[in-house]
Amino acid sequence: MERAVDVLRDASVWLRSLPKGDINEKQEEGFPFKKDAPTTKPDAIWSKTKEPQIVVETDSFDKKKLKDKHDEFNFDKAREKLREKLESVLAFPSELKEKFQTKFLHDTAVKVDISEREETRSGKETDFDREYDIIELRENIFVIGGATEGNESEPSSAVGVFNCAERTWREIAPLPVKTTACYATEVTAIPALVVAGGFGGWKALNTVQMYDWVTKEWCILKPMRKRRWGCYATGTEHGILVAGGCDQGTVLSSVELYNVKKREWFTLPEMLEPRCNFGGGIIDRKLLVVGGGSGFYFNSAKNSAEIFDGEKGKWTKLPPMKRKRYGCAAVAWKRKLFVVGGCDKSGSDVLEVEAFDLEGHVWLNFPPLPVGYSLCRAKIVQNMLVAFGADGGENTAYAFDFELNRWEKHIELPQGRNAYAIGVIGI
Protein backbone atom coordinates (compact mmCIF):
# COMPACT_ATOMS: atom_id res chain seq x y z
CA MET A 1 0.00 0.00 0.00
CA GLU A 2 1.70 3.19 -1.19
CA ARG A 3 -0.30 5.52 1.10
CA ALA A 4 -1.56 4.57 4.55
CA VAL A 5 -4.32 6.51 6.21
CA ASP A 6 -3.01 8.74 8.99
CA VAL A 7 -2.51 6.67 12.16
CA LEU A 8 -4.31 8.94 14.58
CA ARG A 9 -7.27 9.36 12.25
CA ASP A 10 -7.52 5.57 12.15
CA ALA A 11 -7.38 5.49 15.93
CA SER A 12 -10.23 7.96 15.96
CA VAL A 13 -12.33 5.71 13.74
CA TRP A 14 -11.85 2.64 15.91
CA LEU A 15 -12.17 4.38 19.26
CA ARG A 16 -15.34 6.18 18.14
CA SER A 17 -16.88 2.81 17.35
CA LEU A 18 -16.52 1.70 20.99
CA PRO A 19 -19.59 1.77 23.31
CA LYS A 20 -20.55 5.27 24.37
CA GLY A 21 -19.70 4.68 28.02
CA ASP A 22 -16.08 3.88 27.13
CA ILE A 23 -15.75 7.05 25.08
CA ASN A 24 -17.10 9.22 27.89
CA GLU A 25 -14.67 7.58 30.29
CA LYS A 26 -11.79 8.56 28.04
CA GLN A 27 -13.02 12.15 27.85
CA GLU A 28 -12.86 12.53 31.61
CA GLU A 29 -9.19 11.68 31.36
CA GLY A 30 -8.52 14.27 28.69
CA PHE A 31 -9.45 12.23 25.60
CA PRO A 32 -9.53 14.76 22.71
CA PHE A 33 -12.58 13.60 20.75
CA LYS A 34 -16.23 14.67 20.71
CA LYS A 35 -18.72 13.37 23.25
CA ASP A 36 -21.48 13.07 20.71
CA ALA A 37 -19.76 10.32 18.70
CA PRO A 38 -22.32 7.99 17.09
CA THR A 39 -22.74 4.67 18.87
CA THR A 40 -25.35 2.96 16.72
CA LYS A 41 -22.89 1.81 14.09
CA PRO A 42 -19.12 2.00 13.50
CA ASP A 43 -17.56 4.73 11.40
CA ALA A 44 -15.66 2.25 9.22
CA ILE A 45 -17.01 -0.94 7.75
CA TRP A 46 -14.67 -3.56 6.32
CA SER A 47 -16.08 -4.87 3.07
CA LYS A 48 -14.80 -8.40 2.42
CA THR A 49 -15.33 -8.22 -1.32
CA LYS A 50 -13.07 -9.29 -4.14
CA GLU A 51 -11.31 -5.94 -3.88
CA PRO A 52 -11.56 -5.02 -0.19
CA GLN A 53 -11.95 -1.37 0.64
CA ILE A 54 -12.80 0.88 3.58
CA VAL A 55 -16.26 2.40 3.37
CA VAL A 56 -16.29 5.62 5.38
CA GLU A 57 -19.81 6.66 6.37
CA THR A 58 -19.05 9.72 8.50
CA ASP A 59 -16.55 12.58 8.58
CA SER A 60 -14.28 10.66 10.96
CA PHE A 61 -11.24 11.28 8.81
CA ASP A 62 -11.73 15.06 8.90
CA LYS A 63 -9.23 17.03 10.96
CA LYS A 64 -10.26 17.42 14.59
CA LYS A 65 -9.72 20.52 16.72
CA LEU A 66 -7.09 19.70 19.33
CA LYS A 67 -7.32 20.48 23.01
CA ASP A 68 -4.44 21.93 24.98
CA LYS A 69 -4.30 19.03 27.47
CA HIS A 70 -3.47 16.28 25.01
CA ASP A 71 -0.54 15.21 27.22
CA GLU A 72 -3.03 13.79 29.74
CA PHE A 73 -4.11 11.09 27.32
CA ASN A 74 -3.79 7.63 28.95
CA PHE A 75 -1.86 5.51 26.44
CA ASP A 76 -1.97 2.30 28.51
CA LYS A 77 -5.78 2.15 28.58
CA ALA A 78 -6.02 3.26 24.94
CA ARG A 79 -3.72 0.43 23.88
CA GLU A 80 -5.89 -2.14 25.65
CA LYS A 81 -9.03 -0.84 23.92
CA LEU A 82 -7.30 -0.89 20.55
CA ARG A 83 -5.95 -4.38 21.20
CA GLU A 84 -9.47 -5.64 21.96
CA LYS A 85 -10.74 -4.04 18.78
CA LEU A 86 -7.96 -5.48 16.62
CA GLU A 87 -8.43 -8.97 18.05
CA SER A 88 -12.06 -8.96 16.94
CA VAL A 89 -11.10 -8.44 13.28
CA LEU A 90 -9.92 -11.31 11.06
CA ALA A 91 -8.66 -9.30 8.10
CA PHE A 92 -6.90 -5.94 8.24
CA PRO A 93 -4.65 -4.01 5.82
CA SER A 94 -1.03 -4.76 6.65
CA GLU A 95 0.34 -1.24 6.89
CA LEU A 96 -2.51 0.02 9.06
CA LYS A 97 -1.91 -2.83 11.48
CA GLU A 98 1.81 -2.06 11.61
CA LYS A 99 1.13 1.61 12.36
CA PHE A 100 -1.32 0.73 15.13
CA GLN A 101 1.13 -1.69 16.68
CA THR A 102 4.01 0.79 16.47
CA LYS A 103 2.10 3.75 17.90
CA PHE A 104 -0.38 2.17 20.32
CA LEU A 105 0.27 -1.52 21.00
CA HIS A 106 3.97 -1.27 21.80
CA ASP A 107 4.95 -2.31 25.32
CA THR A 108 6.33 1.15 26.03
CA ALA A 109 3.84 4.00 25.74
CA VAL A 110 4.89 6.38 23.00
CA LYS A 111 3.53 9.91 22.99
CA VAL A 112 2.68 10.87 19.45
CA ASP A 113 3.74 14.18 18.03
CA ILE A 114 0.51 16.15 17.61
CA SER A 115 1.81 17.70 14.43
CA GLU A 116 1.37 14.31 12.75
CA ARG A 117 -2.38 14.78 13.03
CA GLU A 118 -2.23 17.82 10.77
CA GLU A 119 0.04 16.19 8.21
CA THR A 120 -1.31 16.68 4.71
CA ARG A 121 -2.25 13.46 2.96
CA SER A 122 -1.02 12.72 -0.53
CA GLY A 123 -3.55 13.04 -3.33
CA LYS A 124 -2.52 9.66 -4.71
CA GLU A 125 -5.15 6.89 -4.62
CA THR A 126 -4.73 4.39 -1.80
CA ASP A 127 -4.39 0.87 -3.13
CA PHE A 128 -6.29 -1.57 -0.94
CA ASP A 129 -6.02 -4.25 -3.60
CA ARG A 130 -6.12 -7.56 -1.70
CA GLU A 131 -3.93 -6.38 1.15
CA TYR A 132 -4.92 -8.30 4.27
CA ASP A 133 -3.06 -9.25 7.39
CA ILE A 134 -4.04 -12.15 9.61
CA ILE A 135 -4.98 -11.19 13.15
CA GLU A 136 -6.40 -14.43 14.56
CA LEU A 137 -4.51 -17.64 13.87
CA ARG A 138 -6.59 -20.73 13.15
CA GLU A 139 -4.55 -22.74 10.72
CA ASN A 140 -6.04 -24.72 7.85
CA ILE A 141 -4.19 -27.36 5.80
CA PHE A 142 -5.01 -27.61 2.10
CA VAL A 143 -4.53 -30.82 0.10
CA ILE A 144 -4.63 -29.71 -3.53
CA GLY A 145 -4.89 -31.64 -6.79
CA GLY A 146 -2.77 -34.73 -7.32
CA ALA A 147 -3.27 -37.85 -9.40
CA THR A 148 -6.02 -40.40 -8.92
CA GLU A 149 -4.52 -43.53 -7.39
CA GLY A 150 -4.42 -46.31 -9.94
CA ASN A 151 -4.86 -43.84 -12.81
CA GLU A 152 -1.90 -41.50 -12.66
CA SER A 153 -2.66 -40.05 -16.07
CA GLU A 154 -5.83 -38.44 -14.66
CA PRO A 155 -5.06 -35.34 -12.55
CA SER A 156 -7.53 -34.18 -9.91
CA SER A 157 -9.16 -30.82 -9.27
CA ALA A 158 -10.27 -31.70 -5.74
CA VAL A 159 -9.24 -29.51 -2.80
CA GLY A 160 -9.66 -30.69 0.78
CA VAL A 161 -9.21 -28.47 3.84
CA PHE A 162 -8.34 -29.65 7.34
CA ASN A 163 -9.34 -27.27 10.15
CA CYS A 164 -6.61 -27.67 12.78
CA ALA A 165 -8.77 -26.23 15.56
CA GLU A 166 -11.85 -28.39 14.89
CA ARG A 167 -9.87 -31.38 13.56
CA THR A 168 -12.27 -31.81 10.66
CA TRP A 169 -11.99 -32.21 6.87
CA ARG A 170 -14.18 -30.58 4.24
CA GLU A 171 -14.12 -30.00 0.51
CA ILE A 172 -13.99 -26.51 -1.00
CA ALA A 173 -14.33 -25.19 -4.54
CA PRO A 174 -12.28 -27.31 -6.98
CA LEU A 175 -9.31 -26.08 -8.97
CA PRO A 176 -10.21 -24.35 -12.25
CA VAL A 177 -7.51 -26.45 -13.96
CA LYS A 178 -6.84 -30.06 -12.94
CA THR A 179 -3.24 -30.65 -12.01
CA THR A 180 -0.77 -33.01 -10.39
CA ALA A 181 2.95 -32.78 -9.47
CA CYS A 182 2.30 -29.10 -8.69
CA TYR A 183 3.48 -26.90 -5.82
CA ALA A 184 1.44 -24.69 -3.48
CA THR A 185 2.61 -21.68 -1.52
CA GLU A 186 1.12 -19.00 0.69
CA VAL A 187 0.91 -15.35 -0.38
CA THR A 188 1.98 -13.30 2.62
CA ALA A 189 0.12 -10.09 1.71
CA ILE A 190 -3.33 -11.72 1.78
CA PRO A 191 -4.85 -14.96 3.10
CA ALA A 192 -4.45 -16.75 -0.23
CA LEU A 193 -2.77 -19.79 -1.74
CA VAL A 194 -1.08 -20.08 -5.12
CA VAL A 195 -0.75 -23.37 -7.01
CA ALA A 196 1.98 -23.26 -9.64
CA GLY A 197 2.62 -25.55 -12.59
CA GLY A 198 2.18 -29.31 -12.59
CA PHE A 199 0.79 -31.85 -15.03
CA GLY A 200 -2.54 -31.65 -16.81
CA GLY A 201 -3.17 -34.89 -18.63
CA TRP A 202 0.61 -35.53 -18.69
CA LYS A 203 1.30 -32.19 -20.27
CA ALA A 204 3.47 -29.78 -18.31
CA LEU A 205 1.54 -26.67 -17.28
CA ASN A 206 2.49 -23.02 -16.91
CA THR A 207 -0.81 -22.37 -15.13
CA VAL A 208 -0.88 -20.38 -11.88
CA GLN A 209 -4.07 -20.64 -9.80
CA MET A 210 -4.84 -18.59 -6.69
CA TYR A 211 -7.47 -19.20 -3.99
CA ASP A 212 -8.61 -16.21 -1.93
CA TRP A 213 -9.76 -17.33 1.52
CA VAL A 214 -11.85 -14.19 1.99
CA THR A 215 -13.82 -14.30 -1.28
CA LYS A 216 -13.76 -18.15 -1.38
CA GLU A 217 -12.90 -18.02 -5.06
CA TRP A 218 -10.22 -19.37 -7.38
CA CYS A 219 -8.74 -17.21 -10.10
CA ILE A 220 -6.10 -17.85 -12.74
CA LEU A 221 -3.11 -15.50 -12.80
CA LYS A 222 -0.97 -14.69 -15.80
CA PRO A 223 0.81 -17.91 -16.88
CA MET A 224 4.48 -18.49 -16.17
CA ARG A 225 6.99 -18.08 -18.96
CA LYS A 226 8.03 -21.75 -18.62
CA ARG A 227 5.95 -24.90 -18.29
CA ARG A 228 6.93 -26.67 -15.06
CA TRP A 229 6.10 -29.79 -13.07
CA GLY A 230 8.02 -30.80 -9.96
CA CYS A 231 8.98 -27.15 -9.41
CA TYR A 232 9.37 -25.17 -6.19
CA ALA A 233 7.37 -22.03 -5.38
CA THR A 234 7.30 -19.56 -2.51
CA GLY A 235 5.67 -16.26 -1.62
CA THR A 236 8.00 -13.27 -1.23
CA GLU A 237 7.58 -9.63 -0.28
CA HIS A 238 7.42 -8.83 -3.99
CA GLY A 239 5.19 -11.65 -5.19
CA ILE A 240 5.54 -15.31 -6.16
CA LEU A 241 8.86 -16.96 -6.96
CA VAL A 242 8.98 -20.21 -8.95
CA ALA A 243 12.18 -22.18 -9.58
CA GLY A 244 13.29 -25.30 -11.43
CA GLY A 245 11.06 -28.23 -12.27
CA CYS A 246 10.71 -30.08 -15.55
CA ASP A 247 9.43 -28.96 -18.91
CA GLN A 248 8.20 -31.66 -21.28
CA GLY A 249 11.71 -33.04 -21.80
CA THR A 250 14.12 -30.84 -19.84
CA VAL A 251 15.03 -30.33 -16.19
CA LEU A 252 15.10 -26.58 -15.61
CA SER A 253 17.44 -24.27 -13.73
CA SER A 254 15.44 -21.14 -14.59
CA VAL A 255 13.77 -18.92 -11.98
CA GLU A 256 10.98 -16.41 -12.44
CA LEU A 257 9.12 -13.98 -10.19
CA TYR A 258 5.51 -12.79 -10.48
CA ASN A 259 5.15 -9.20 -9.26
CA VAL A 260 1.68 -8.92 -7.71
CA LYS A 261 1.54 -5.16 -8.18
CA LYS A 262 2.58 -5.12 -11.82
CA ARG A 263 0.86 -8.45 -12.59
CA GLU A 264 3.83 -9.51 -14.65
CA TRP A 265 6.47 -12.28 -14.65
CA PHE A 266 10.17 -11.37 -14.53
CA THR A 267 13.15 -13.64 -15.16
CA LEU A 268 15.70 -13.98 -12.33
CA PRO A 269 19.26 -15.41 -12.47
CA GLU A 270 19.28 -19.18 -13.02
CA MET A 271 20.23 -21.69 -10.35
CA LEU A 272 23.72 -23.15 -10.57
CA GLU A 273 22.22 -26.60 -11.25
CA PRO A 274 18.98 -27.79 -12.87
CA ARG A 275 16.60 -29.34 -10.32
CA CYS A 276 13.19 -30.98 -10.12
CA ASN A 277 11.30 -32.36 -7.11
CA PHE A 278 13.50 -30.48 -4.65
CA GLY A 279 13.02 -28.43 -1.49
CA GLY A 280 13.60 -24.81 -0.61
CA GLY A 281 12.95 -22.01 1.86
CA ILE A 282 13.67 -18.35 2.58
CA ILE A 283 15.90 -17.23 5.47
CA ASP A 284 16.93 -13.61 5.97
CA ARG A 285 15.45 -12.70 2.57
CA LYS A 286 17.69 -15.27 0.89
CA LEU A 287 16.39 -18.32 -1.00
CA LEU A 288 17.94 -21.71 -0.23
CA VAL A 289 17.31 -24.74 -2.49
CA VAL A 290 18.42 -28.31 -1.78
CA GLY A 291 18.37 -31.79 -3.26
CA GLY A 292 16.06 -32.94 -6.02
CA GLY A 293 17.27 -34.52 -9.21
CA SER A 294 18.94 -33.55 -12.46
CA GLY A 295 16.66 -35.98 -14.33
CA PHE A 296 13.10 -37.25 -14.24
CA TYR A 297 13.78 -40.20 -11.91
CA PHE A 298 15.28 -40.96 -8.51
CA ASN A 299 18.52 -42.30 -10.05
CA SER A 300 19.49 -38.64 -10.62
CA ALA A 301 19.15 -37.75 -6.91
CA LYS A 302 21.57 -35.11 -5.64
CA ASN A 303 22.67 -33.73 -2.28
CA SER A 304 23.84 -30.30 -3.46
CA ALA A 305 22.53 -27.01 -2.04
CA GLU A 306 22.74 -23.37 -3.09
CA ILE A 307 21.58 -19.95 -1.94
CA PHE A 308 20.31 -16.91 -3.85
CA ASP A 309 21.01 -13.39 -2.59
CA GLY A 310 18.51 -11.05 -4.23
CA GLU A 311 20.50 -7.93 -3.36
CA LYS A 312 23.63 -9.27 -5.06
CA GLY A 313 21.60 -10.99 -7.76
CA LYS A 314 23.59 -14.23 -7.74
CA TRP A 315 23.59 -17.85 -6.59
CA THR A 316 26.30 -19.34 -4.35
CA LYS A 317 27.04 -22.97 -3.47
CA LEU A 318 26.40 -24.24 0.06
CA PRO A 319 27.90 -27.30 1.78
CA PRO A 320 26.17 -30.46 0.44
CA MET A 321 23.66 -32.45 2.47
CA LYS A 322 24.75 -35.73 4.03
CA ARG A 323 22.23 -37.71 1.95
CA LYS A 324 21.10 -37.51 -1.67
CA ARG A 325 17.36 -36.79 -1.84
CA TYR A 326 15.01 -36.92 -4.82
CA GLY A 327 11.46 -35.80 -4.00
CA CYS A 328 12.42 -34.19 -0.69
CA ALA A 329 10.74 -31.23 1.03
CA ALA A 330 12.18 -28.36 3.05
CA VAL A 331 10.90 -25.65 5.40
CA ALA A 332 12.62 -22.64 6.94
CA TRP A 333 12.23 -22.30 10.71
CA LYS A 334 14.23 -20.34 13.31
CA ARG A 335 17.00 -19.49 10.82
CA LYS A 336 17.42 -23.15 9.84
CA LEU A 337 16.33 -25.02 6.73
CA PHE A 338 14.88 -28.43 7.68
CA VAL A 339 14.98 -31.10 4.94
CA VAL A 340 12.83 -34.24 5.15
CA GLY A 341 11.92 -37.21 3.00
CA GLY A 342 12.87 -38.12 -0.54
CA CYS A 343 14.75 -41.16 -1.81
CA ASP A 344 18.34 -41.85 -2.81
CA LYS A 345 19.72 -43.03 -6.17
CA SER A 346 18.72 -46.62 -5.44
CA GLY A 347 15.11 -45.63 -4.72
CA SER A 348 15.39 -46.27 -0.97
CA ASP A 349 13.48 -43.83 1.25
CA VAL A 350 15.62 -41.45 3.29
CA LEU A 351 14.44 -41.36 6.91
CA GLU A 352 17.17 -39.07 8.23
CA VAL A 353 16.24 -35.43 8.87
CA GLU A 354 18.86 -32.73 8.57
CA ALA A 355 18.83 -28.97 8.92
CA PHE A 356 21.18 -26.33 7.55
CA ASP A 357 22.17 -23.72 10.13
CA LEU A 358 22.70 -20.52 8.17
CA GLU A 359 24.64 -18.87 11.00
CA GLY A 360 27.01 -21.78 11.59
CA HIS A 361 27.07 -22.73 7.90
CA VAL A 362 26.77 -26.39 8.84
CA TRP A 363 24.30 -29.30 8.51
CA LEU A 364 22.77 -30.63 11.75
CA ASN A 365 21.11 -33.99 12.47
CA PHE A 366 17.57 -34.34 13.87
CA PRO A 367 15.45 -37.38 14.82
CA PRO A 368 14.50 -39.44 11.73
CA LEU A 369 11.03 -39.74 10.23
CA PRO A 370 8.98 -42.69 11.54
CA VAL A 371 8.11 -43.72 7.94
CA GLY A 372 9.61 -43.14 4.52
CA TYR A 373 8.21 -40.61 2.05
CA SER A 374 9.78 -40.94 -1.40
CA LEU A 375 7.77 -37.88 -2.51
CA CYS A 376 7.43 -35.56 0.45
CA ARG A 377 5.63 -32.33 1.28
CA ALA A 378 6.30 -30.34 4.46
CA LYS A 379 4.92 -27.25 6.19
CA ILE A 380 5.13 -25.50 9.55
CA VAL A 381 1.73 -25.98 11.23
CA GLN A 382 1.00 -24.77 14.76
CA ASN A 383 4.74 -24.30 15.38
CA MET A 384 5.49 -27.89 14.39
CA LEU A 385 7.15 -29.36 11.31
CA VAL A 386 4.53 -31.53 9.59
CA ALA A 387 5.60 -33.98 6.86
CA PHE A 388 3.15 -35.42 4.31
CA GLY A 389 3.77 -38.41 2.07
CA ALA A 390 2.59 -37.52 -1.43
CA ASP A 391 3.74 -40.80 -2.99
CA GLY A 392 0.39 -42.52 -2.40
CA GLY A 393 1.82 -45.13 -0.04
CA GLU A 394 1.25 -43.48 3.33
CA ASN A 395 -1.79 -41.40 4.33
CA THR A 396 -0.59 -40.43 7.80
CA ALA A 397 1.06 -37.04 8.28
CA TYR A 398 3.63 -36.86 11.09
CA ALA A 399 4.50 -33.76 13.13
CA PHE A 400 7.86 -32.97 14.70
CA ASP A 401 7.52 -31.17 18.03
CA PHE A 402 10.56 -28.91 18.42
CA GLU A 403 10.12 -28.64 22.20
CA LEU A 404 9.79 -32.39 22.78
CA ASN A 405 12.30 -33.19 19.99
CA ARG A 406 10.22 -36.08 18.64
CA TRP A 407 7.85 -37.13 15.85
CA GLU A 408 4.23 -38.16 16.42
CA LYS A 409 1.16 -38.85 14.32
CA HIS A 410 -0.66 -35.67 13.36
CA ILE A 411 -3.54 -36.30 10.93
CA GLU A 412 -4.87 -38.88 8.51
CA LEU A 413 -5.13 -37.58 4.94
CA PRO A 414 -7.91 -38.45 2.48
CA GLN A 415 -6.96 -41.56 0.54
CA GLY A 416 -6.76 -42.11 -3.17
CA ARG A 417 -4.38 -39.38 -4.42
CA ASN A 418 -0.67 -38.83 -4.84
CA ALA A 419 1.66 -36.09 -6.11
CA TYR A 420 -0.64 -33.49 -4.55
CA ALA A 421 0.34 -30.07 -3.21
CA ILE A 422 0.08 -28.90 0.39
CA GLY A 423 -0.67 -25.35 1.52
CA VAL A 424 -1.38 -23.74 4.88
CA ILE A 425 -3.43 -20.64 5.65
CA GLY A 426 -3.65 -19.16 9.13
CA ILE A 427 -6.94 -17.29 9.49
Image (tube, grey):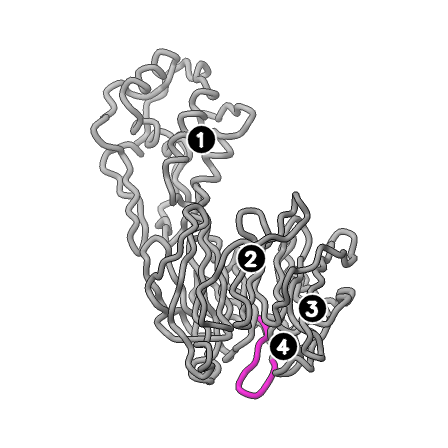
Tags 1 and 3 touching, CB below 8 Å = no
Residue 79, numbered circle: none
Helix, strand or loop under label 2 = strand
Q: Sequence-wise, which precedes: disc 2 or disc 3? A: 3
| Residue 265 place in picture, x, y as percent | 48, 70
Considering the numbered disc 3 on the image, is that residue within a helix, a strand or a loop?
A: loop
Q: Secondary structure at mark 4?
A: loop
In primary-sequence order, the first of circles 2 and 1 is 1
Of 18 and 399, nearer the camera is 399
Furthest toward the left, the residue is 40
Kindly identify the amino acid type of the residue bearing the numbered disc 4. Ser
Q: CA distance from mark 4 to mark 2?
A: 24 Å
* Residue 23 image point, x, y percent: 32, 20
Q: Amino acid at mark 2?
A: Lys
Residue beneath disc 1:
116
The magenta-colored residue range is 243-251
Q: Which residue is mark 3?
A: 350
Residue 253 circle label: 4
